[in-house]
Image (tube, grey):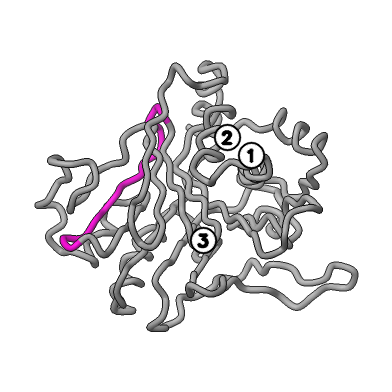
Amino acid sequence: MCGIWYLTSKRQLCYNEVLKSAIQINNRGQNGWGTLIDYETFFRYKKSMPLKGEGDRVSIEPLSFPNHKEIRTWIYNNRYGTVGGDKFKNFPPQIFVGESNVTKGNICGNDMLFTFLNGEFKVDDQRKELENLGFAVRATTDTAVIGGYVQRFLLDGADLLNAVVMTLESISGAYGVIFFRNHEAVIARDVFGTRPLYLFISDLGNRICAASESQCFKPLDPFYLDNFMTDHPYSAGWRPFIPGEVIRIKDHEIVESYLMKKEDLKWDKSSLNTILRQNA
């Protein structure tokens, strides 16, 4: 199982506090498989030296967190590589626009979508559908196809939250997932609650953390366990994501939410059992 971690803050955070929170998911895979740091003005991700005929390629090397006072948003993904798979093609985060994983010629190069996944999707039909729509799907992971499907709805004019909801209601999966685009995040857990995903909001509401391990919150608040978020869906405290819950975060605040329902899913629920058996 992979690990995902997201943290955004209205104020500067102590570097050690951030690092200690993020590394709580290190038991879930190789360090730094996917790291995204948003400086409010640009994204930072590591590139290797270009290979002949390849141009720049995203490196599979870990990207450490820089100790930089301007950083307000961080996302981290630990995972094990697919057995027998190409490490480059399986590298998350999947960067869809202006990079080599999933692209479509009429998307602007500065409109990148990043996808961080803990879980699995059944995407064979959707991969073919994207290719028929003119997308170049080069990465081998389900993460890439899911992100490409979100891009499909974005191109049709949907905002990020609705594009994510339409994607997740259309494709069978067991997951906690984070999508990030233009300084905006959408985070979701599947309607059956098959993968762990937790939410933390600080007392003043100026820090929001989502992670596949609740112990990620301890460096941010040593007493977080004493404050379970029960009185209001997005008050201070912590709790598991509700199965089917989708939240949109912008300007370091939860600005919108949605609850997916089993009856709205457009895929056969029996396919979920196949996914869970394959990853038991």
| Secondary structure under the numbered disc 3 in the rendered image | strand
Residue 27's x, y, as percent? 40, 57
Give me the disc on residue 167. 2
Looking at the picture, which amino acid does disc 2 mark? Thr
Which comes sooner in the sequence, label 1 or label 2? 1
Which comes sooner in the sequence, label 3 or label 1? 3
Quick check: marks 3 and 1 in contact, CB under 8 Å? no
Looking at the picture, which amino acid does disc 3 mark? Gln
Which comes sooner in the sequence, label 3 or label 2? 3
Tally of numbered discs: 3
Q: Write the residue at 24% across / 56% down.
A: 201
Q: Which segment did they paint magenta?
A: 191-204
Main secondary structure of the magenta stretch: loop
**CA distance for labels 1 and 2:** 8 Å
**CA distance for labels 3 and 2:** 28 Å
Query: Which residue, given by chain and number where applicable, does mark 1 sit on?
Result: 153
**Number of residues whose C-alpha sits closer than 10 Å to that of mark 3, classed few (under 14), some (14–19) or many (20 or more):** some
Query: Which residue, given by chain and number where applicable, does mark 3 sit on?
Result: 30
